[in-house]
Image: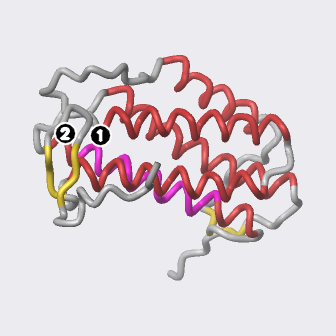
């Protein structure tokens, strides 16, 4: 099987359902950003040592493929293929993990600057890409393009998870949290 199809050589691509759109279409930009996030999470996972964290990140990566499939589907077409879906339990998994990590973290008394360790910095980069994906989903909604509400909720919670993960990893590595000290 060849990896190239040549069908996109003129700047068009197909959504699931067959609708052709420009590669610059907001829907393509949105699921492309989710794909970018998934790649960053692969790198984040390479820095992780805790088995439970690594396992959850792999699960998150799987859910991001689900999110991508949802965003890549033309909601006005009847597709012949079964599209995976998110469940409220997927959001709950993130919330439970956030709560669990927070039990060992010191109270946050200031904004923190990303950094202190490569693993921490990469978590923050993934968090920022996740927020961009979330903003793009909101943009789609504002332009009357269908986005499953659970997709938006999942991305919102995932960015929270990635922030807490950055703090948790830093804590585990005994990396200094860098407080933001505004100039006044």
Q: For mark 2, does the 10 Å Cα neighbourhood hold few (<14), some (14 to 19), or many (20 or more) residues? A: some
Query: Which percent across, then down, holds residue 24?
Result: 20, 61
Which residue lies at the image location 43% right of the left edge and 23% below the top edge? 84
**Residue position for label 1:** 72
Q: Which residues are magenta?
A: 123-138
* Residue furthest to the bottom: 183
Query: Vertically, is 56 above or below 112?
Result: above
Q: Identify the disc placed on residue 174.
A: none
Where is residue 176, by image quadrant?
bottom right
Residue 59, picture quadrant: top right
- Going 45% across and 23% down the picture, which residue do you hit? 86
Mark positioned earlier in the residue sequence (2 or 1): 1
Residue 163 appears left or right of 145? right
Q: Residue at x 73, y 38 (%)?
A: 102
- Rendered position, 126 above or below 165: below
Q: From the viewer's perspective, tell me whether residue 97 is left or right of residue 82.
A: right
Q: Give residue 63's position: percent from left, percent from top.
A: 52, 33
- Way the structure is coloured: secondary structure
Is most of the magenta stretch helix, strand or loop?
A: helix
Could you say which disc has been placed on residue 141 in the image? Answer: 2
Residue 134 is one of the magenta-drawn residues: yes
Q: Is 74 or 180 nearer to us in this picture?
A: 74
């Amino acid at each position: 099987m060849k990896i190239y199809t040549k069908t996109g050589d003129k700047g068009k691509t197909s959504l699931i359902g067959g609708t052709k759109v420009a590669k610059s279409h907001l829907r393509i930009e949105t699921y492309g950003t989710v794909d970018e996030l998934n790649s960053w999470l692969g790198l984040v996972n390479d820095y992780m040592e805790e088995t439970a964290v690594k396992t959850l990140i792999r699960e998150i990566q799987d859910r991001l493929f689900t999110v991508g499939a949802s965003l890549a589907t033309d909601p006005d077409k009847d597709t012949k293929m079964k599209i995976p879906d998110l469940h409220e339990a997927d959001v709950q998994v993130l919330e439970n993990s956030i709560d669990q990590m927070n039990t060992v973290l010191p109270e946050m008394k200031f904004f923190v600057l990303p950094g202190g360790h490569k693993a921490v910095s990469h978590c923050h980069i993934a968090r920022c890409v996740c927020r961009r994906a979330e903003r793009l989903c909101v943009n789609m909604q504002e332009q009357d393009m269908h986005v499953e509400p659970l997709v938006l909720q999942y991305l919102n919670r995932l960015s929270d998870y990635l922030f807490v993960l950055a703090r948790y990893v830093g804590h585990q590595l005994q990396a200094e949290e860098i407080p933001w000290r505004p100039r006044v």
